[in-house]
Image (cartoon, rainbow, N blue to C red):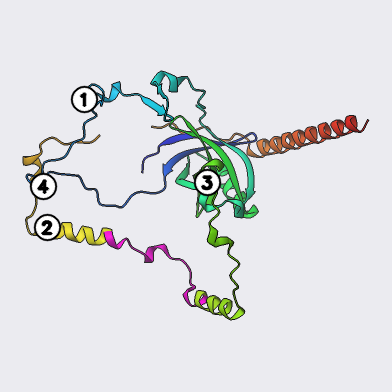
Amino acid sequence: MRAIWTGSIAFGLVNVPVKLYSATEDHDVDMHQVHEKDGGRIRYQRRCEECGKIVEYDDIVKAYDDGDHRVIITKDDLEALPADKSDDIDVLQFVPNDQIDPIMLEKSYFLEPTSKTPKAYLLLRQTLEDTERTAIVKITLRTRTRLAILRVCGKVLMIQTLRWADEIRDVDFKGVNSRAKISDKELKMSAKLVESYSEDFTPEEFTDDYQVELRKLIDAKIEKGETLDLEETFPDESEEDEDSGGDVVDLMEALRKSVERTRSEKKGRSDGKKESTAKRTG
């Protein structure tokens, strides 16, 4: 695995230097589109529908259409946006684990400690486990600021990006509001059926049968000689670190100051509310 991001988890005055790695990978068999007659690769061209010319990638910009208007968004426009370039994973709050709805989860990443003495990393991991909490964090990946969760996954800390609240669709299907009566017998029988299927989930027991059979088909064709010599037929197809962060100098002192600062901020907000209430009462 190769690290795709290097920075620190920041909460209070504590910094935990980490590297970010993609936690998942696609196991699908890669295939190309080819001409059935001679096996030649099918290449797509970016052709302008106005002038009919093939357009180089560097000459392409983005546009937004609302049906009546088209707005051109240039690369300079995008670069001018106030994007956060922070190398920190900022902890915004800690919430109970069961408050994270799985529908909000997107891509997963592993976090590797990069400090020579990873005590702060281990402390954060243990604290999240003991308190059964998940951290809500903000992280900037590829110039986009994302909301994410920071949680424990086995022995490592993991980041999982979240969908924003307005990306979750509201639904109200007619059937779910039905008042169909469910009898006690039906409920008991349904519970028995669920119990008969109940066991611990072991992901390794399940395989992608389609990909397995596809690989068998490819291997069989290779064995029968139903292949093309790619070097002969299609010559020349090719495809295209990181400094570790500083150590936490005095972890206990940073933790103590962070707690004191949080208490002070909460007290300030509380005093402000009391003062505002007193003024309204007066």
Q: Which residue is mark 2?
A: 221
How would you rate the neighbour count of disc 4 (Cα within 10 Å): few for under 14, some for 14-19, many for 20 or more?
few
Compared across the picture, whether 180 is left or right of 258 comes to left
What amino acid does circle 3 point to? Answer: Ile
Q: In whole angstroms, how far apart are the C-alphas of marks 4 and 3?
A: 42 Å
Tell me where residue 100 appears, x and y as whole percent.
58, 51
Circle 4/circle 3 CB separation < 8 Å: no
Residue 90 appears in the picture as rendered: yes
Q: Which mark is residue 54?
A: 1
For marks 3 and 2, give the one nearer the viewer: 3
Give the SS element for disc 3: loop
Mark 3 or mark 2, which has the lower sequence index? Answer: 3
Q: How many marks?
A: 4
Q: Which residue shows up at 9% across the image and 41% down it?
A: 231
Q: Nearer the viewer, residue 175 or 44?
A: 175
Q: Residue at the location (24% across, 29% down)?
A: 46
Tell me if residue 94 comes above or below residue 219 in the rendering.
Answer: above
